Each structure stands twice: as structure tokens, then as C-alpha cells.
């Protein structure tokens, strides 16, 4: 334990959390708010929060259930677990039993509880979401980063996974894959999923498939790896990204039947910590997971908007001599500013963190450095969350385009009319780079 004195009180800190800072995605949002309070116009491309409103049918369900006040079962509302199991089969062809579903206050909490109850090393590809590694550190687990590359769209290589596991085949391990991915927006092709499933099965790893962005695959073609490794895959999802309800804090874990013992262990810890997820939120979530016409319409147009914004912004970045492939889902870009390294170094910028701090101070554009996602500090990658626009307005405007195929007819005019902060931010960025 580490000790220090503060305000005449002796404080003890667990060594696992000494030096650990607040989640960078949340920190950049708070920093942006502070700057806004000072009167600055901040382009908020840091926090990955859905810009779209919660569908009205789900909001109405919450209104109708605001009176629900009783403690619900630790594992979750039975009707909700049934709805999630049906959703798993209907949307992703994953066979689920309601008894194998666990509901929690956000998928982040559930991922943390899993690491707490299952003793095993954590294997994660880099770049990865910012909270996986800190959670393991808090608990005291070993973390093994697996390097990926731009040429492979930053995806986990099954041969690398096999090589890691081969050194000690019987060692317990948790492997986390997240796709469409935060921070890149890229997903896994079918054959790669099958190869990863084969490697995971060979070493009996616990595979967490974080599919929180699965429903906002830009063409609605998300495939779960649980179809190929059902016995060892836990599918993590929730309402935050595809239903625009990040602040509602509702996550789901879908287990295979043979891992019910692990669910039981997590439920035991849950009973002694968060007890149960908010009752009104769980009742409203039943409506979301049952889907229906209104939800399908909502998803069709949110996917379409995100797809068209991605095309527009990738084109803009390529005009800046920043090459990257089009993302397949979510609302992230992960460009590398290597083309400008020499010019940036002349201004004192050597790391991705220095790059993001300079862009925030000079251009009022908030984004996150690649180092926050496990990349080397000197690599000039950044994560851009293209969410700074009025999602409600964009949804209403998009409907005039109707259902006209996967490519649609939206163009730069739609983006300029409905996503002006994004357009302005990228114009500022392009001009700054041109003047270096």
C-alpha cells in the first residue's frame, strides 16, 4: 500500500491504482466543457458518444415505467433477458438462453467484473479501447498487448494469438476483440473471424467479443464470432452506441451455457456491489431489444448518415496527404500524421500526445492521441470521433432520401448542411497542416 498525507488525513492507496488517471475519453470531454465555459468554441471529437437521440419509442417506454421502483433480480429483468436472447438470434444468429444473459450498469462494468472473477492474463490488440488495460491493472492482472498494423487495418492476427498462447498452452487467458472497433471503425472479415475462433478454441481461451458497435456496422452486415466459437465466447453489448443511450448505463453479457458457472460468479459479485441495474431503464430496454419497425428505421438512417460522413471525412484526410481506409462501422477514424513528422518536429511536436494538445490549443479541436489506445508515444496516430453534429436534425433530414439502396444519394451537401462542426473542424485542420 502507498501512503501519503493530504489535508492532515492519512490516505492509503492500493499500489495497483497509484498513478492511474481518469479515463482519457471522459477526461477529454470534461476538458472540452471547461474550455466551452470560458467562451471557446470547441470541436468535440474526443468522447465517443452517439450524436443521435434515443428513439422516441424507447423514451416513451421509459416514461411509462418511471414508477418501477422495486429491486430487480441481480441477473436482470426476466423480460429483458428474454428480449436480449431473442435479439441475439434474430439479429446475429447466436443461440442464447435467457438464463445465460447478464444485465449490468454498462458493458464496462461487466467487463471489469469478468476480469475480477476469472483469474487469467488479458490479451488485447493495440490499438484498443482505453479502459481494458486499466481495468486489468486495477485488479492486478497481467496485460499482454498484441501489436497490429495499419496494413492489416489494426486487426488481431490469429497467428500472433497462437504464438502467444503456445508458450504456455494451459495458462488461463482472456482475449478481448472489439469490432467494429474503437478507435479505428474497422471490422473483421468472415474468414479472419473463423481463424481467430480456431486459435481461441485450440487453447480454450475465454473470448470477450465486444460488439457494442455491432448494430452500427455501416451496412448492417455485422457477424459475431460467437457463431464460430460459441462454447468460449461471451458477447458484450448494450444500449449506449446503437440506441444513443450512453448515459442510461445498460450493458449485456451473453454467455454460452457451458460458461454459466462464470455468470454465476459474476452475479455473486454483482449482488455485493451494484445489486441490480436501474429498474425503469431495464423495462425501457425491453422495447429497444425487441426492435420493430421504428427501431429498424432508426438504425437504417443512423447507419446511412455515419457511412456518408465517414466517406466525406476520409476524402478530406486524403486531400491532406493522410492515407487511411474507409471504416466499416461505428463513428471513429484513426489517421496517422506521419507525412508531417518532419514539419511537426520543427514546431516541437514529437508524440501523438503533443500533437493532440497542440491541435486543441491552436484549433480548439479535441481528439485523443494514439498512445491512449496502446500505441507507441512517438507514433503520430490520433483517434477522431466524428460525433460533433446535431444527430436529431441529421436524422430528420436524412429521411427525405428514403430507402434507395446501401450507397444512397447523400453527398457533401448533406454533410455541410447537417454536420457543420465537423466540416469546420476538418477545414481548420487542413489549413493548419498546409501552413506548417
Image (cartoon, rainbow, N blue to C red):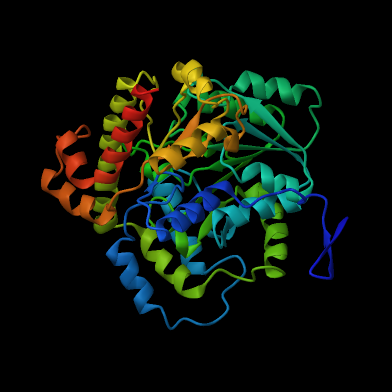
Q: Position of residue 5 (x, y in %)?
A: 84, 63
Quarter of the image with the C terminus in it = top left
Is 62 or 308 nearer to us in this picture?
308
Side of 299 relative to 400 (left or right): right
Side of 416 relative to 22 (left or right): left
The residue at 73%/24% (across/down) is 164
Residue 351 vertical placement versus 53 (above, below): above
Q: Position of residue 89 (x, y in %)?
A: 43, 48
Is 341 or 82 nearer to us in this picture?
341
Side of 401 relative to 164 (left or right): left
Residue 180 visible, this angle = no
The residue at 54%/58% (across/down) is 106
Is 158 or 377 nearer to us in this picture?
377
Q: Position of residue 142 (x, y in %)?
A: 77, 38
Residue 322 visible, this angle = yes
Residue 179 vertical placement versus 8 (above, below): above
For residue 324, what is the image quadrant? top left
Most extreme residue toward the front, as rendered? Answer: 347
Side of 111 relative to 245 (left or right): right
Q: Position of residue 60 (x, y in %)?
A: 31, 72
The residue at 72%/63% (across/down) is 269
Quarter of the image with the N terminus in it = bottom right
Amino acid at each position: 500500500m502507498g501512503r501519503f498525507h493530504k489535508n492532515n488525513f492519512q490516505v492509503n492507496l492500493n499500489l495497483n491504482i497509484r498513478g492511474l488517471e481518469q479515463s482519457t475519453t471522459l477526461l477529454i470531454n470534461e476538458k472540452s466543457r471547461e474550455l466551452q465555459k470560458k467562451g471557446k468554441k470547441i470541436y468535440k471529437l474526443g468522447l465517443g458518444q452517439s450524436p443521435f437521440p434515443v428513439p422516441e419509442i424507447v423514451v416513451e417506454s421509459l416514461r411509462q415505467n418511471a414508477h418501477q421502483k422495486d429491486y430487480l433480480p441481480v441477473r436482470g429483468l426476466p423480460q429483458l433477458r428474454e428480449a436480449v436472447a431473442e435479439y441475439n438470434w434474430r439479429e446475429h444468429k447466436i443461440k442464447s438462453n435467457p438464463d445465460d444473459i447478464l444485465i449490468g450498469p454498462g458493458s464496462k462494468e461487466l467487463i471489469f467484473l469478468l476480469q475480477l472473477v476469472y483469474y487469467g492474463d488479458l490479451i488485447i490488440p493495440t490499438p484498443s479501447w482505453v479502459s481494458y488495460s486499466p481495468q486489468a491493472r486495477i485488479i492486478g492482472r497481467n496485460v499482454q498487448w498484441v501489436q497490429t498494423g495499419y496494413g492489416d487495418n489494426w486487426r488481431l492476427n490469429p497467428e500472433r494469438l497462437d504464438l502467444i498462447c503456445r508458450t504456455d498452452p494451459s495458462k488461463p487467458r482472456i482475449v478481448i476483440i472489439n469490432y467494429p472497433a474503437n478507435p479505428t471503425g474497422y471490422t473483421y472479415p468472415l474468414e479472419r473471424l473463423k481463424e481467430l475462433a480456431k486459435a481461441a478454441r485450440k487453447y480454450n481461451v475465454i473470448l470477450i467479443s465486444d460488439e457494442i458497435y455491432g448494430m452500427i456496422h455501416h451496412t448492417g452486415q455485422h457477424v459475431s464470432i460467437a457463431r464460430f466459437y460459441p462454447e468460449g465466447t461471451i458477447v458484450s453489448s448494450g444500449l449506449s452506441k446503437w440506441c444513443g443511450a450512453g448515459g442510461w448505463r445498460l450493458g449485456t453479457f451473453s454467455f454460452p451455457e457451458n460458461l454459466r458457472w462464470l455468470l454465476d460468479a459474476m452475479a455473486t459479485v454483482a449482488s455485493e456491489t451494484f445489486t441490480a441495474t436501474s429498474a425503469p431503464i431495464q423495462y425501457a430496454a425491453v422495447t429497444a431489444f425487441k426492435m420493430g419497425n421504428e427501431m429498424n428505421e432508426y438504425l437504417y438512417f443512423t447507419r446511412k448518415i455515419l457511412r456518408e460522413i465517414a466517406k466525406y471525412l476520409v476524402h478530406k484526410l486524403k486531400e491532406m496527404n493522410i492515407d487511411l481506409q474507409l471504416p466499416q462501422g461505428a463513428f471513429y477514424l484513426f489517421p496517422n500524421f506521419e507525412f508531417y513528422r518532419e514539419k511537426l518536429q520543427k514546431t516541437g511536436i514529437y508524440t501523438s500526445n503533443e500533437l493532440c494538445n497542440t491541435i486543441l490549443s491552436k484549433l480548439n479541436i479535441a481528439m485523443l492521441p494514439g498512445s491512449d489506445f496502446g500505441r507507441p508515444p512517438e507514433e503520430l496516430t490520433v483517434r477522431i470521433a466524428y460525433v460533433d453534429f446535431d444527430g436529431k436534425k441529421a436524422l430528420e433530414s436524412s429521411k427525405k432520401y428514403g430507402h434507395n439502396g446501401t450507397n444512397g444519394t447523400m453527398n457533401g451537401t448533406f454533410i455541410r448542411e447537417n454536420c457543420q462542426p465537423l466540416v469546420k473542424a476538418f477545414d481548420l485542420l487542413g489549413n493548419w497542416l498546409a501552413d506548417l
